Amino acid sequence: MLEKFSNWKDGFGKKKDASEELELVSIPKHVAIIMDGNGRWAKKKGLPRIAGHREGMKVINKIVRKANELGIETLTLYAFSTENWKRPKAEVDFLMRLPELFLGKELPVLMEENVKVRLMGSKENLPPHTLRAVETAITKTNENTGLILNFALNYGGRTEIIQAVQTMAKQVQEGLITYDQIDETLMADNLMTNQLPDPDLLIRTSGEIRLSNFMLWQLAYSEFWFTEVLWPDFTEIHFEEAIREYQHRGRRYGGV
C-alpha cells in the first residue's frame, strides 16, 4: 500500500490526452470526496475564508454532473464534520448557510438530472434553516433513480461507530439478538450508510493525506487518491484522472 502513496503527486497537473478515455465498464460505483482547501485557496488570494467556501460550492455542481454523466451510482461529499464546530462562529454560520444556498439554486437541476439527495450525519445542532433545506431536497428527490448525492453533514466516523455499537448493545440487552450474532454485516446494517455500498474510491484534495474521521469503517478497502489541488480549483479533468488511476489498480481485498 505504501508504495502507492510514494508517487501520488507524480505527473499531477499534466493534462491527459483527450483520446485517453475512461473505461466505462469499470467505473467505481461509490466515490467519496473530502473537499479540502477552501480556506487556503481564499488566503492565497487575500480573501476571507468564506470566499473559498463559496467558490468551493460551485465546484460541487460540476462534479455532481460529471459523476452522473459517468454512471457513478453514489457520490458522498464530506461537507461538515463534527469537529468543524470548533471553527470561528462567522465561518460556521456561513457553512451552515451553504446547503440552503446550494440546494435553493441547484434543486431544479438535480430534479432534471434525476439525482437523489441523502443526508449522512447527526441532525442535532443543525440550524433549522439548514435542516429545512436538506429535508426539502431529500423529500423532493426521493423518487429519483439516478445518482445518489450523499451529503456528510455534521458527521464524524467515530461517533457513527459508537452509535452503532450502542444500538447493538441495546438489542442484546433487550434479548433481540445475542452477542455472538454481532458480525461485520450487522455492524454495517447499523451504520448511517446501511443502504449504500462502501466507497470504491476516496478522493481528498489540498495535499492532506489523512481521513479526518471520515467513514472509518466504510473505507477499510477503498482505494485512496490524493492531490495537492485545492478544492475550489478541482475540475472534471482532475475527477476523471482520479477515476482513471482507480481503474489501473488491482483490488485484492487482502488476497493475492
Image (cartoon, rainbow, N blue to C red):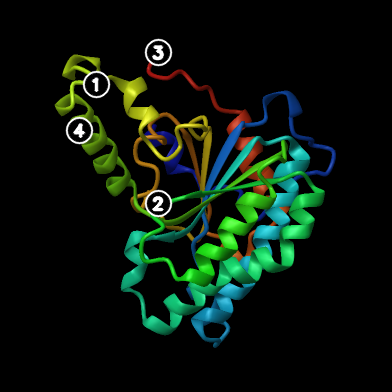
Answer yes or no: do the residues labelled 2 and 1 have beta carbons within 8 Å? Answer: no
Q: Do the numbered discs 1 and 4 sit on residues whose CB atoms are within 8 Å?
A: no
Q: From the image, tell me which residue sits under label 3.
A: 255
Corner quadrant of residue 21: top right
Task: Using a 10 Å C-alpha cutoff, classify the residue at mark 3 as few (fewer than 14 neighbours), some (14 to 19) or many (20 or more).
Answer: few
| Mark 4 → mark 3, Cα distance in angstroms | 35 Å
Q: Earlier in the sequence, mark 1 or mark 3?
A: 1
Mark 1 and mark 4: Cα distance apart in space = 9 Å
Most foreground residue, 6 or 184: 184
Q: Secondary structure at mark 4?
A: helix
Disc 4 or 3, which lies upstream in sequence?
Answer: 4
Quick check: can you spot residue 15? no
Q: Give the residue displayed 36% in from the left and 21% down from the top.
A: 185
The structure residue drawn at horizontal position 42% and vertical position 19%, both measured from the top left corner, is 253
Q: Is residue 238 left or right of residue 111?
A: left
Q: Nearer the viewer, mark 4 or mark 3?
A: 4
Residue 156 sits above or below residue 179 on the image: below
* Residue 175 figure quarter: top left
Looking at the rendered structure, the kind of residue marked 4 is Lys
- Position of 191 compared to 95: left or right? left
The reply to whether the C-beta atoms of the residues labelled 4 and 3 are less than 8 Å apart is no
Q: Which mark is residue 209?
A: 2
Where does label 4 land, which residue?
Answer: 170
The residue tagged 1 is 176
Three-letter residue code for mark 1:
Leu
Q: CA distance from mark 2 to mark 4?
A: 36 Å
Residue that sits furthest to the left in the current view = 173
